[in-house]
């Protein structure tokens, strides 16, 4: 009941009930008892007014006391409580709004704690992952300074190793910078309508040359119709494919590596499948590989363990394209990554 309605009821009760009582009393009391009748009338008025005022007071003071207590809890940083809406008036609505505010504050606080935890983990990962190549670079530079690289062959090998380690550091820093931009939605996507067949054939051609140089076998199949088109950011989607393939190569444990790429038509979407014959991912880790900063036990114990954000970048880009990404894996046999992007479909003008 709304507070306004309660006040109207109080006003009507104070005005009408005594009048009803007087009407009944005038027909009941003995003539000549006017003073007693007036005193009784005043008593009824005061009793009715007092009872109704107490009713209004209780309906306001009790929830206000709860709100005061809740405000003190929030001031002290305690958000683990609940404010229940016990009435349907304005005060009850205020309690509900206060409870929603508390829940939002609690969610924001928990999100901040999680964000701080992830930042600490990221800093720890960066420190570890940068320390490895820096240590190697220092070691090889000291070897050159001390004259250990005393032949042209050794000098060439040392310089190449230093160059490769510097590239690893540069790649990691670029990955972290990109993730920061993606996470804060500061990457401008340049979407374009392209041929699905032509675009992925270009991607496959680039992959074939890169993998051939690394002595990795590459297999490509495109089952799309020639006229099928998609709306994508060509640069960002190519980054998705390159990140997935780079991840496969990083954990490749077979003498002869194999990478497969298939493009399939699945109704309103096209599906891209990128498979490898690497070490695979355990069933325990598989559901979490796209979470940011998550690294499997194998990568934690490996010198190849990255920052743990590569696949989270991939997931973010695919989702920004209106698609979805998932993976299947078998330990010792390999992993297959799947992602889908929506087809471009022209809509008639009258629709």
Image (cartoon, rainbow, N blue to C red):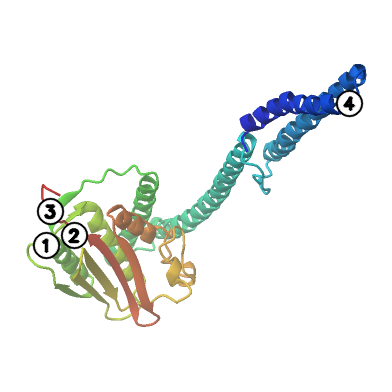
Q: Residues within 10 Å of mark 4 (few under 14, many from 20)?
A: few
Cα–Cα span, label 2 and label 4? 91 Å
Relative to the observer, which residue lies in front, 335 or 13? 13
- Where does label 1 land, which residue? 228
Q: Say which quarter of the image contains residue 76.
A: top right
Residue 245 place in picture, x, y as percent: 28, 67
Q: Earlier in the sequence, mark 2 or mark 1?
A: 1
Instruction: Single out the mark in the foreground, 3 or 4.
Output: 4
Q: Say which quarter of the image contains residue 247.
A: bottom left
Q: Residues within 10 Å of mark 1 (few under 14, many from 20)?
A: some
Mark sitting on residue 343: 2
In the image, what residue occupies the spot 78% across and 25% down?
A: 23
Cα–Cα span, label 3 and label 1? 11 Å
Q: Earlier in the sequence, mark 4 or mark 1?
A: 4
The reply to whether callout 2 and callout 1 are in contact (CB within 8 Å) is yes
Residue at disc 1, secondary structure: loop
In the image, what residue occupies the spot 30% across and 79% down?
A: 277
- Where does label 3 land, which residue? 346
* Side (left or right) of 56 relative to 5: right
Cα–Cα span, label 4 and label 1? 98 Å
* Side (left or right) of 31 relative to 156: right
């Amino acid at each position: 009941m709304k507070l306004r309605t309660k006040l109207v009821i109080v006003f009507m009760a104070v005005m009408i009930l005594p009048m009803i009582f007087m009407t009944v009393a005038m027909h009941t009391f003995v003539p000549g008892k006017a003073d007693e009748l007036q005193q009784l009338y005043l008593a009824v008025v005061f009793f009715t007014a007092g009872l109704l005022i107490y009713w209004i007071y209780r309906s306001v003071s009790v929830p206000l006391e709860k709100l005061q207590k809740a405000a003190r809890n929030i001031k002290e940083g305690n958000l683990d409580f609940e404010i229940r809406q016990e009435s349907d008036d304005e005060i009850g609505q205020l309690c509900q709004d206060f409870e929603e505010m508390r829940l939002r504050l609690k969610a924001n606080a928990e999100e901040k704690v999680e964000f701080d935890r992830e930042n600490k983990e990221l800093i720890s990962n960066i420190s570890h992952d940068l320390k490895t190549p820096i240590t190697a670079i220092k070691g090889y530079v000291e070897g050159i300074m001390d004259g250990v690289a005393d032949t042209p062959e050794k000098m060439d090998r040392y310089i190449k190793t230093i160059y490769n380690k510097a590239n690893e550091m540069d790649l990691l820093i670029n990955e972290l910078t990109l993730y920061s931009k993606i996470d804060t939605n500061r990457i401008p996507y340049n979407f374009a309508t392209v041929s699905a067949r032509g675009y992925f054939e270009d991607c496959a051609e680039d992959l074939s040359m890169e993998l051939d140089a690394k002595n990795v076998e590459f297999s490509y199949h495109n089952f799309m119709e020639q006229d099928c088109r998609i709306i994508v950011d060509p640069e960002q989607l190519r980054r998705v494919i390159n990140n997935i393939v780079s991840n496969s190569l990083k954990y490749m444990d077979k003498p002869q590596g194999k990478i497969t790429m298939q493009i399939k038509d699945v109704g309103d979407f096209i599906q891209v499948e990128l498979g490898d014959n690497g070490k695979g991912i355990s069933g325990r880790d598989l559901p979490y590989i796209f979470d940011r900063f998550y690294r499997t036990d194998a990568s934690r114990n490996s010198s190849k363990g990255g920052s743990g954000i590569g696949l989270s970048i991939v997931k973010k880009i695919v989702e920004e394209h209106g698609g979805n990404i998932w993976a299947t894996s078998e330990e010792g046999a390999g992993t297959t990554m799947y992602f889908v992007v929506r087809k471009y479909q022209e809509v008639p003008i009258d629709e």
